Amino acid sequence: MSIQIKNICCIGAGYVGGPTMSVIADKCPALTVNVVDINEDRINSWNNEDLENLPIFEPGLSAIIKKCRGRNLFFSTKIEENVACADIVFISVNTPTKKKGLGAGQASDLKWVEACARQVAKFAKNHTIVVEKSTLPVKTAEVIKKILESSHTLLKGDQKKSFDVLSNPEFLAEGTAIRDLEEPDRVLIGGDNEEAILALSSIYREWVPEEKILHTNVWSSELAKITSNAFLAQRISSINSIAALCESTGANISEVARAIGSDKRIGSKFLDAGPGFGGSCFKKDILNLVYLSSFFGLPEVANYWESVVKLNNWHQNRISKLIVQKLFGTITAKKICILGFAFKANTNDTRESSAIKICRDLIEEGANLFIHDPKVKPRQIESDLSKKNLNIDDEFEGQLNYREGNWFYSYNIYEAVKGADAIVVF
Ligand SMILES: NC(=O)c1ccc[n+]([C@@H]2O[C@H](COP(=O)([O-])OP(=O)(O)OC[C@H]3O[C@@H](n4cnc5c(N)ncnc54)[C@H](O)[C@@H]3O)[C@@H](O)[C@H]2O)c1
């Protein structure tokens, strides 16, 4: 008998949970989609009347929210009741790199995933399909399964709970998330229960062609996601390493990139030299791959992938030095305009943004930064730079060289650029 899906619950209303569930609600009007989160502020922003105040900026997202919110898409902090009535629960919570303990600095911290599994185990009723949407190390599904199975002891009376665990990693890229979700290159579903796989596939089949929905075992699916990010990041480190060589030899990196990208075997994507990769995923997922490789006794594989991250760190340091060098060896009290602070265009996400490291270095060197990014709020930059911004009117009126080593938030791009010794475009 096939499993019928009517109610979806997604735990985690972040950069993945919010947009992914919005697109599912849009494409599947017959389904009810509940997105839940422990962060009340975030949920309030998702429910804000003014669509300019959504917690996440993605082109096309607010139009979908306008259409679906209150119809078949709901945001709340009511985890218990929404898990209880769900046929499918997506786990879409954060999985940052561990800061302490075993595997610190490399392995993913799975405490939020484990907490979710325990919540699902406790609140679910009847049969529930649990889907790993978060990016997880290989074999995490086994851990989730164990936690869920232990919930049998929580049963009361004749009530029966059962679970299937599937892996369905998300491949969206921030900045193009809605397009990526609406026209994915592929949807990957890993699992061993054909009925559960078909039930999850039936959601995507509403708008994704059948041949793009790939079925694998759980572990291939988990590994494919981190490997995919590792390959993308590797291309960025590769082209940035060649950019450094171009600067020393007089070759032009754009010309080199165009020439090599014309080879169909290589392709032209991800060949733009820049300030290095940022975002919450690339570094974390590669470090996770490094940890897994070491754990399974493959130090050569671990070293290979670690070098991609090392090159990126080296490259980011190199950029700040290059700026100082181009400004005649000193930037003390000079005005430097920073255009863009998020880790890439068309997002408000600043996690691991190259701008953070480079701006900190420039402030340390004594420059006064004027930062303009219409999608990133001053308090976010303040928290990323661990430094309060100064009020332009109070501090800078007619005396540009008055202080050194500060940063100012510019709402106005012209004001940011005016009189600048250099403009850094991220
Ligand atoms: N951001 C991306 O571009 C992207 C792309 C693909 C995959 N991923 C992966 O998806 C996952 C989520 O990433 P994100 O960027 O959406 O993270 P995020 O930090 O934006 O959102 C995660 C949300 O989960 C909530 N949360 C944590 N524990 C919870 C719990 N027990 N109950 C309810 N809510 C809880 C947090 O409050 C937060 O709002 C990560 O594993 C990430 O690697 C991210």
Image (tube, rainbow, N blue to C red):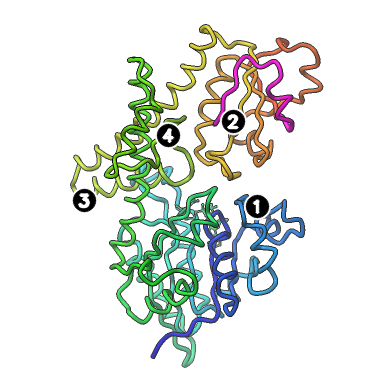
The residue labelled by disc 2 is 385
Q: Give the number of the mark in front: 1 or 2.
A: 1
What residue would you read off at disc 3? 296
Disc 1 element: loop
Label 2 beta carbon within 8 A of ligand 1: no
At horizontal 58% and vertical 60% (from top left) the residue drawn is: 18
Disc nearest the viewer among 4 and 1: 4
Describe residue 52's horizontal placement relative to residue 146 as left or right. Answer: right
Looking at the picture, does residue 225 appear above or below residue 82? above
Residue 363 sits inside the magenta stretch: no
**Is label 3 in a helix, a strand or a loop?**
loop
Q: Is residue 245 above or below residue 236?
A: above
Q: CA distance from mark 4 to mark 1?
A: 29 Å
| Residue at point 27%, 44% (across, down) | 265
The disc labelled 1 sits on which kind of residue? Pro
Look at the numbered discs 3 and 2 and tell me whether their residues touch, using CB distance below 8 Å.
no
Q: 121 or 419: which is nearer to us?
A: 419
Q: Residues within 10 Å of mark 2 (few under 14, many from 20)?
A: some
Residue 382 position, x and y percent, is 65, 33
Structural distance between the alpha carbons of marks 3 and 2: 37 Å
